[in-house]
Amino acid sequence: IFFRLKMSPKRDALPLTIDGTTYDVSAWVNHHPGGAQIIENYRNRDATDVFMVMHSQQALNKLKRMPVMEPSSPLTPKSPSDDISEDFRKLRNSMVEKGMFNASPLFYVYKSLTTVALGAVGVLMVMYLQWYYVSAMFLGLCYQQLGWVAHDYAHHQVFTNRDYGNLGGLFFGNVLQGYSLTWWKDRH
């Protein structure tokens, strides 16, 4: 088996503005779980809203460790949609303060166990009772729910630690459902 070492090409500065501060994210762009293209789309633009919606406090802390720079070109002047964006930011901040984005560990324990139980019941029905149609319904419901459970783990909604989220995504996606977490992240 041959392994290839993929070297990252040296990049020019990649300015990205979040909350009025412009960061050079060029050292991180090739490691971004959502892919480099999405970051490239926000080059020299204010990405505050999309960043805050799609990233955790852990990602914000990582961003704040990146080099700060002056924008290489002026940001787009204020438009009428900026008032809508400002209203959105206020709404989001009030929801964060109320804890509306905090995951419930008890819910995910319940959801994970009941989803796996649906599959187990479906398999047992086939093996011991030979109830093929009822079993198919249980297995179908199990696979449908596994997709959403794996989705929440892979989006790091269950744990604040990304490694645990990836592990959950691997278990519920790769092991139980049979799709690649890497494939899913590359296309999602």
Image (cartoon, rainbow, N blue to C red):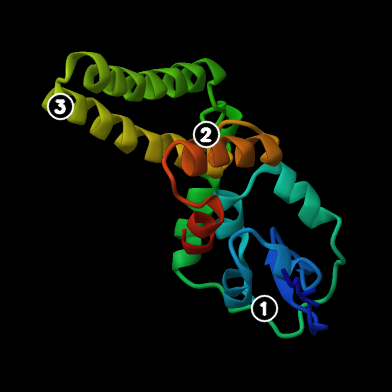
Of 3 and 75, nearer the camera is 3
The amino acid beneath tag 1 is Asn
Tell me, for residue 132, which label it has, or none: 3
Name the residue carrying label 2. Answer: 95
The amino acid beneath tag 2 is Met
Of 66 and 183, nearer the camera is 183
Label 3: element kind: helix
Specify which label sits upstream in the sequence, 2 or 1: 1
Could you tell me if the residues under marks 1 and 3 are in contact, i.e. CB atoms within 8 Å? Answer: no
Label 1: element kind: loop
Name the residue carrying label 1. Answer: 44
Q: Categorize mark 2 by other alpha carbons within 10 Å: few (<14), some (14-19), many (20+).
A: few
Q: Quadrant of residue 115?
A: top left
Q: Nearer the viewer, mark 1 or mark 3?
A: 3
Task: Identify whether 132 is placed above or below 155.
Answer: above
Name the residue: 57% across, 28% down.
Answer: 102
Residue 116 pos. (x, y %)? 41, 23
Specify which label sits upstream in the sequence, 1 or 3: 1
Task: Identify whether 48 is placed above or below 97.
Answer: below
Residue 43 pos. (x, y %)? 65, 77
Name the residue: 55% across, 26% down.
Answer: 98
